[in-house]
Amino acid sequence: MIFADKLIMLRKKAGWSQEELADQMNVTRQSVSKWEGAQSIPDLEKMLRLSELFGVSTDYLLKDDIEEAEPIAPSDDTPPLRRVSMEEANAFLAVKAMTAKTIAYAAFLCILSPIVLFILSAISENKAGALNEDVAAGIGMIVLIIFVAIAAAMFVSSGSKTSPFAYLDKEPFETEYGVSGMVKERKAHYKDQHTKSDIAGTCLCITAFIPIFAGAIVDADNGLLLTVMLSLSFFIAGVGVLCFIQTGIIWESFEKLLQEGDHSKENKKKSSVSAAVNTAYWVIATAVYLGYSFWSNNWGLSWIIWVIAGVLFPAVIAIAGAFEKKSK
């Protein structure tokens, strides 16, 4: 008996339609139809998934000379996969869409937080200005701390709203009938907006340097003008980052439910070394930024630390991943 015939028999025995099996496999109904029509065969990952679904060995599925199914008894120490209902999936997507905007604006506030300090410090250094340097620094720091505090509250609030769905990040799961199809449809519908947001974010981050260069061309010796231009650059870059974060979180929510990309079942089984490195890296980067800025009082230059951190981050994650694989 060939694979196609075995698949038809197993599917009918389970009482599933082609569409229902497709949902279980996170593929289209056309793919299942081709498998059953002997027009194609699943890849190794899909074959292993079929073996798990029907409780038979891969040898039975792949070898035509094995006519009788060889049941695989589930291990007693392997807990059943959690099933995500349509209601849970819709609730998760709604929460992620809401918190995506909150997190994006929180990051935007963090980027804007030093702008008042920049401008007031520049005004105080201008001999024609009547603002005392200490007063300018004090007011600027107060505004910076308020902005960061508001952003932190927004981050914490968003985290508390998404915490009930933490299992989607930490463990493999199955989706109930219709969930995968719904998520794929919404992901396809959102794809154009995701692409446009990515393009907008990229263009804004690149053009954010223009005001700095423009200020240097107009009057390189005018500290106040350069500071205003730098602040404008921060604002433009902040809008770009806002676009990246908001669309990225929404797109990631689709991939989590579909268990695709970085959220596949295989990746979830890996250790959390990369996640720990990710967290530690940005905590250290923030500490270096604040420490250097307070020590040197050169807030107009210390922002470069974030650029350097962003450039080095992929290399750090790659190294962490290499060590993670080597340790296994």
Image: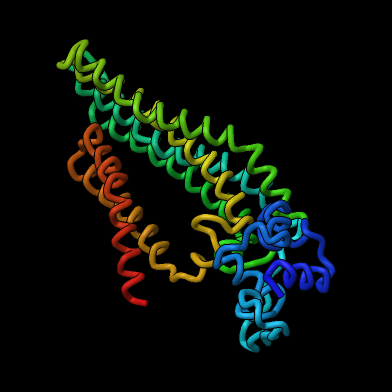
- Looking at the picture, tell me which residue is in the foreground, 136 or 8: 8
Report x, y in % for residue 183: 68, 49
* Total numbered circles: 0
- Looking at the picture, tell me which residue is in the foreground, 199 or 70: 70
Residue drawn at x 35%, y 70% is 324
Q: Is residue 187 left or right of residue 109?
A: right
Q: Is residue 326 left or right of residue 256?
A: left
* Residue 173 at least partly seen: yes
Q: Quadrant of residue 139?
A: top left
Residue drawn at x 52%, y 30% is 196
For residue 239, above or below residue 214: below
For residue 42, above or below residue 315: below
Q: How is the image coloured?
A: rainbow
* Residue 91 at least partly seen: no
The image quadrant where one finds the N terminus is bottom right
Report x, y in % for residue 261: 51, 55
Residue furthest out toward the top: 218
Report x, y in % for residue 44: 55, 67
For residue 197, above or below residue 184: above
The image quadrant where one finds the C terminus is bottom left
Q: Is residue 271 left or right of residue 169?
A: left
- Looking at the picture, tell me which residue is in the foreground, 282 or 275: 275
Residue drawn at x 60%, y 50% is 253
Report x, y in % for residue 164: 65, 61
Residue furthest out toward the left: 221
